[in-house]
Image: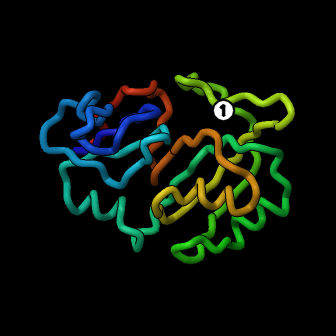
Amino acid sequence: MLILLNKPFKVLSQFRDADGRATLGDYVDVPGVYPAGRLDFDSEGLLLLTDDGPLQARISQPQSRTRKTYWAQVEGTPSQDQLDLLVSGVTLKDGPARAVSARPIEEPADLWPRDPPIRYRASIPANWIEIVLTEGRNRQVRRMTAAVGLPTLRLIRYSSGDWTVDGLRPGTWKQVL
């Protein structure tokens, strides 16, 4: 079984939390499924859940090189040099990291509102970039964009492998396998 979930902002990528925060269990009531990878508490978008151990490993293990596409709303206007640096690689505390691709995009057309919305600052523009990775270290996209001078304000995982968040509103899911 494979479930595609549009994980809302401020939801943990686990089924229980001793501190009472929102979890996957508040949205998915299918027994025996587990996340194939994680998505930060303050990130949104596609999270895959499965009851198939080999599938979970194939999706989430770094050696599988599964492509994940992220939409990042960043503070500032990305230059081509900054985007090129994301692809050529930056050094993070836990080692080098590089994107497969990074490019500016328009705000996605069917984007849902975030609650609460990002902070608005009239003197500093916010723009969107699309970043494709084949690894998924803790807060990697946020740390990479910060390293090139583009702090991430909002982060959405659009796709993982062949699966996308298309047609899913925050908190909704569908079974695809």
Determine the secondary structure under disc 1.
loop
In the displayed structure, would residue 126 be above or below residue 77?
A: above
Outermost residue on the left side: it is 31
Point 46% across, 51% down: residue: 160
Residue highlighted by disc 1:
108
- Which residue occupies the extreme front position in the image? 19
Position in image of residue 174 (x %, y %): 32, 31
Numbered circles on residues, count: 1
Q: Position of residue 81 (x, y in %)?
A: 84, 63
Colouring scheme, one of rainbow, by chain, secondary structure, one colour: rainbow
Outermost bottom residue: 95
Image quadrant of residue 172?
top left
> Which part of the image, by quadrant, shows the C terminus?
top left
Q: Residue at x 26, y 28 (%)?
A: 26
**Identity of the residue drawn at 69% across and 49% down:** 151
* Residue 49 horizontal side relative to residue 69, left or right: left
Residue drawn at the location 43% of the way across and 34% of the way down? 10
Q: Amino acid at mark 1?
A: Pro
Question: In the picture provided, is 26 more to the left or to the right than 164?
Answer: left
Q: Is residue 66 left or right of residue 15?
A: right
Q: Does 46 appear above or below 132?
A: above
Give percent across and percent down for residue 123.
86, 33
Seen from the viewer's position, the closer of residues 142 and 38 is: 142
